[in-house]
Amino acid sequence: MGIYVWGTGCGASQLISQGLEIRRISAFVDSFSQCVDFLGRPILRPEELPVTDCELLIVTTRHSGEVAGQCSRLGLDRERILFLKNHCRLDDMNASCTAAEKLLGRELLERLLPRQRVISTPARLSSSALPESELSGDYVRLSALELICRRLGARVPGAAAELGVYRGDFARCINSLLPERRLYLFDSFSGFAPTDGADAAFQAAHENTSARAVLSRMPNPDMVRLCPGYFPDSLDGLEERFCLVSLDVDFARPTLDGLRWFWPRLNTGGCLLLHDWGNPELPGVAQALEQYEAELGSPIPSLPLPDMKGSLALCK
Ligand SMILES: C[S@@+](CC[C@H](N)C(=O)[O-])C[C@H]1O[C@@H](n2cnc3c(N)ncnc32)[C@H](O)[C@@H]1O
């Protein structure tokens, strides 16, 4: 019975230098290596892994999804696999690994995991601020928001706002990351305006919310100003300057209205996050930006984000 290590590259040598003694490793597993041993231990092909003898398999390569598939075909259960590089999945691939702590001890395990993890929950959103929703799987969107808020710091004055709030999942993150900023939340809280292009199912999917329910989910509700109703009528004479705006209304007309109102009111150094800009299912969002840039007569400096819906960060 012993510990096996998948991979004979940098990840494996890092594992040794971080404290796993070579004498504790029964063998390495590698499908590509042309050598017969690594650091004096034999190298096995995946199909040679003695599954019944394997108490713990430590996977040091970045091909975690592929290795998980091979292990499942070999009959090695996930309780005995520790992935050091969670490269292809956003969830915790080690959730069911019970053998690692038993064999390595908590101290060594804690030393190995944080340094080698590629994907993790954004640090400042890891606790109660993270809603249970599709959003919690969108690491890039959340992490970008976290870093943008860090960059704003105290340098850029102004309030924060979201146009298109739905149940407040993203708004809740903004409210958590910018606890001292006023946060304006604009939504009809009953779906899309009738002529904007939502079909019956899309409309129905966005009706199930309310301003009161959204407010109750905010970690800092005292800073929140709810602006219910169809935008731009819901502005009701508001005048304000902003450091951060999230624009997420899915269709061309409200997106254009949002750009026309918020962009001139965004302070220098501020950021407007245009959700769905790269989403082929909602082409009106990118079309609205094109039209607004034509009205301005120049392109807005921006950075596309590889999040789940292709957000665009517009920077002032
Ligand atoms: C995709 S959802 C927003 C999701 C939210 N930003 C999140 O990430 O959790 C789009 C929202 O835009 C709102 N909306 C669309 N057009 C609007 C308009 N003209 N005025 C107010 N709200 C609008 C809809 O009611 C819907 O709740």
Image (tube, helix red, strand yellow):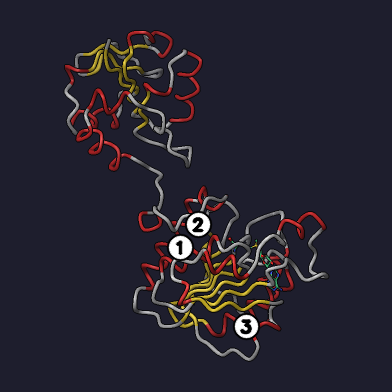
Is disc 3 in contact with disc 2, using a CB cutoff of under 8 Å? no
Residue 14 lies left or right of residue 288; in this view the side is left
Count the labels in the image: 3
Across and down, in percent, residue 32 comes to: 40, 19
- The residue type indicated by label 2 comes to Arg
Which residue position is annotated with label 2? 141
Alpha-carbon span between mark 2 and mark 1: 6 Å
Residue 126 lies left or right of residue 4; in this view the side is right
Circle 3 packing at 10 Å, graded few (<14), some (14-19), many (20+), is some
Residue 65 or 102: which is nearer the viewer?
A: 102
- Badge 3 marks a residue whose secondary structure is helix
For ligand 1, give the image quadrant: bottom right
Which residue position is annotated with label 3? 261
Which residue position is annotated with label 1? 145
Is disc 2 in contact with disc 1, using a CB cutoff of under 8 Å? yes
Q: Which of the 4 quarters of the picture holds residue 285?
A: bottom right
